[in-house]
């Protein structure tokens, strides 16, 4: 006999009970949910204990999942770190070899210098500071570049003494009064300072331009290339400026003559140090009397 096509619940009492029970549970769930929603809206702390109880049950599970996740993710991270550390280790070993060779050369040069100084009985000369004075003014608009110090002959300041700031050479004393002195800046067109390049010791001349910068000109060589950022310090030639005082840094690359920016800006200085000449000229001997 073929099964009946009618599937309505009226033909099975069990199915009727099941459907009725489902409707009852759905209505009861909706009512309970609405009641809980109203209670949580008007009295939020009422469910704090329930929330904390659920959180206490789920926290260990979440912690375990985080631990497992971190362990899984740490595997590729550890592999990448191993390869990176291995490469850095190789680079550091190569750098140590290069540094060891440079250190050996430096030690050899230092030993040779000590031996030569002992043979020649050469003594180092250091410039003696005279006074620390305040820069009370400087010219910024004219073609000449001067600065004014609030120290003069009463403080033992004499013409020709070098003046330097914390960051580099400022210039030299040009004129002195009782309590004031005028300084010729390195940027003045009449200023010429013997310098050398720090990376190879190449000699040059720093000549003022009158616009707050200097020209670096090569001496005793042609087709000399200057790179951007080359730094120049005083060479000690001439005996006025002590060697090793920062002067200027090259602004743009060029050949034979380039523009450089001085390290010491008089407009930004409050105080400057007046020093004695590095190698002052010996006094001239008195004239001999004429023969009878």
Image (spheres, rainbow, N blue to C red):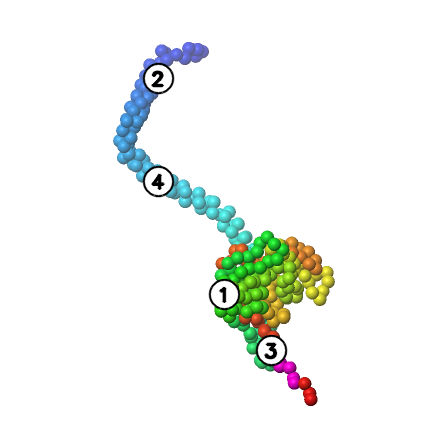
CA separation in Å, label 1 and label 2? 112 Å
Local SS, label 1: loop
Local SS, label 4: helix
Q: Residue under circle 3?
A: 283
Judge whether residue 60 is colored magenta.
no
Q: Residue at x 70, y 58 (%)?
A: 255
Q: Which label lies toward us, 4 or 1?
A: 1
Task: From the top left corner, tell me how far across and down residue 284 is, in percent.
Answer: 62, 78
State whether residue 129 appears in this view: no
Question: Of the numbered discs in the image, which one, if any, rests on residue 59?
Answer: 4
Q: Which label lies toward us, 1 or 3?
A: 1
Q: Are marks 4 and 1 in contact (CB under 8 Å)?
A: no
Task: From the top left corner, tell me how far across and down residue 228 is, in percent.
Answer: 63, 55
Sequence-wise, the earlier of marks 4 and 3 is: 4
Q: Write down the quadrant of residue 287 in the picture.
A: bottom right
Which residue in the rendered view is the most extreme toward the right?
222
Q: Which label lies toward us, 2 or 4?
A: 4
State whether residue 64 appears in this view: yes
Sequence-wise, the earlier of marks 1 and 2 is: 2
Q: Which label lies toward us, 1 or 2?
A: 1
Q: Residue under circle 1?
A: 179
Q: Which label lies toward us, 2 or 3?
A: 3
CA separation in Å, label 2 and label 4? 38 Å
Q: Which residues are magenta?
A: 284-289
């Amino acid at each position: 006999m073929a099964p009946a096509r009618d599937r309505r619940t009226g033909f099975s009492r069990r199915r009727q009970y099941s459907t009725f029970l489902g409707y009852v549970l759905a209505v009861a769930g909706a009512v309970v949910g609405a009641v809980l929603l109203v209670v949580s809206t008007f009295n939020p702390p009422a469910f704090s204990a329930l929330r904390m109880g659920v959180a206490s049950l789920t926290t260990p599970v979440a912690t375990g999942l985080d631990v497992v996740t971190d362990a899984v993710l740490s595997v590729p991270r550890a592999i990448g770190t191993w390869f990176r550390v291995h490469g850095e280790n190789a680079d550091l070993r190569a750098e140590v070899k290069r540094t060891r060779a440079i250190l050996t050369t430096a030690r050899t040069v230092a030993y040779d210098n000590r031996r030569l100084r002992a043979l020649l009985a050469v003594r180092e000369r250091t410039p003696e500071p005279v006074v620390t004075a305040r820069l009370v003014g400087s010219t910024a608009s004219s073609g000449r570049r001067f600065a004014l110090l609030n120290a003069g002959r009463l403080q033992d300041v004499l013409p020709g003494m070098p003046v330097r700031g914390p960051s580099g050479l400022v210039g030299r004393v040009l004129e002195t009064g009782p309590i004031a002195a005028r300084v010729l800046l390195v940027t003045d067109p009449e200023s010429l300072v013997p310098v050398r390049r720090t990376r190879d010791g190449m000699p040059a001349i720093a000549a003022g331009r009158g616009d707050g910068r200097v020209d670096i000109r090569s001496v005793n060589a042609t087709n000399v290339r200057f790179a951007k950022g080359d730094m120049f310090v005083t060479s000690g030639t001439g005996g006025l400026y002590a060697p090793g005082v920062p002067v200027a840094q090259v602004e743009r690359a060029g050949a034979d003559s380039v523009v450089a920016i001085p390290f010491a800006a008089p407009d930004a200085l409050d105080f400057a140090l007046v020093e004695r000449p590095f190698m002052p000229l010996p006094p001239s001997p008195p004239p001999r009397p004429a023969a009878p």
